[in-house]
Image (tube, helix red, strand yellow):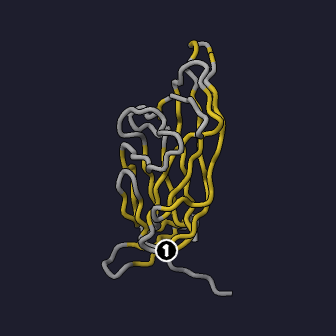
């Protein structure tokens, strides 16, 4: 068995494509990855049976892909670990939802995987209408170069939920992230 003794592989422009530390840690400076964060504004949870992609407050980082605050366009084909998390809070007392769903759209079409969860406003030490709920999805999605991904949150047709998507100035409560895994 041969052992690779290379510590750095370089691009033709002289930058390191891969670095392997003596400890064995591998850093790939061009590994496609992204993280969008927050909500750009204040709104109620999107309409019943919503299919409009969420617009995030900011792009925390985007590497090896093209990011806007509502879409990621991938430059590299492969399997991507993708995650979506929405924190929703401050519903009026006694509101409920049959379910809230989060999902990813690939090239404008719904990807088959969905996260579905029910939520109901609860009373706590702060009073009624102060509950916060997390809705999320994590999946591996097979993508080609130039595919684009978007994140959506929606509520069921029988829902009277009226809470807000929680942002807290881009502190990471509501995020859309992913990276190439193979």
> Is 74 placed left or right of 161 in the picture?
left
In the depicted structure, whether residue 71 falls above or below residue 10: above
Q: Most extreme residue toward the left, as rendered?
A: 13
Q: Is residue 149 visible?
A: yes
Q: Position of residue 58 (x, y in %)?
A: 36, 46
Q: Most extreme residue toward the right, as rendered?
A: 1
Question: Which quadrant holds the N terminus?
Answer: bottom right
Q: Which residue is mark 1?
A: 144
Question: Which quadrant holds the C terminus?
Answer: bottom right
In the depicted structure, whether residue 74 falls above or below residue 97: below
> Is 48 placed left or right of 43 in the picture?
right
Q: Position of residue 51 (x, y in %)?
A: 48, 50
Q: Position of residue 100 (x, y in %)?
A: 60, 40
Residue at 50%, 58% in the rendered image: 105
Disc 1 crowd rating (10 Å Cα; few below 14, some 14-19, many 20+) is: some
For mark 1, give the secondary structure. Answer: loop
Q: Is residue 29 visible?
A: no
Q: Nearer the viewer, residue 1 or 62?
A: 62
Q: Most extreme residue toward the front, as rendered?
A: 157
Figure quadrant of residue 93: top right
> Is 120 placed left or right of 61 in the picture?
right
Q: Position of residue 91 (x, y in %)?
A: 53, 24
Residue at 51%, 28% in the rendered image: 162
């Amino acid at each position: 068995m041969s052992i690779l003794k290379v510590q750095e592989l370089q691009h033709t422009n002289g930058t390191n494509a891969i670095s392997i530390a003596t400890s064995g840690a591998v850093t790939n400076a061009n590994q496609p990855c992204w993280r969008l964060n927050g909500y750009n504004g204040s709104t109620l949870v999107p309409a019943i049976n919503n299919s409009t992609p969420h617009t995030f407050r900011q792009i925390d980082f985007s590497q090896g892909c093209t990011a806007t605050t509502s879409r990621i366009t991938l430059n590299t084909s492969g399997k991507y670990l993708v995650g979506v998390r929405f924190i929703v809070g401050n519903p009026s007392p006694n509101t409920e939802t049959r379910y809230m769903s989060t999902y990813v759209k690939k090239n404008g079409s719904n990807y088959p995987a969905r996260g579905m969860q029910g939520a109901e406003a609860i009373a706590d030490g702060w009073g009624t209408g102060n509950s916060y709920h997390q809705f999320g999805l994590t999946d591996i999605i097979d993508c080609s170069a130039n595919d684009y991904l978007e994140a959506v949150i929606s509520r069921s047709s029988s829902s009277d939920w009226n809470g807000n998507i929680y942002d807290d100035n881009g502190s990471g409560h509501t995020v859309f992230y992913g990276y190439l895994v193979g």
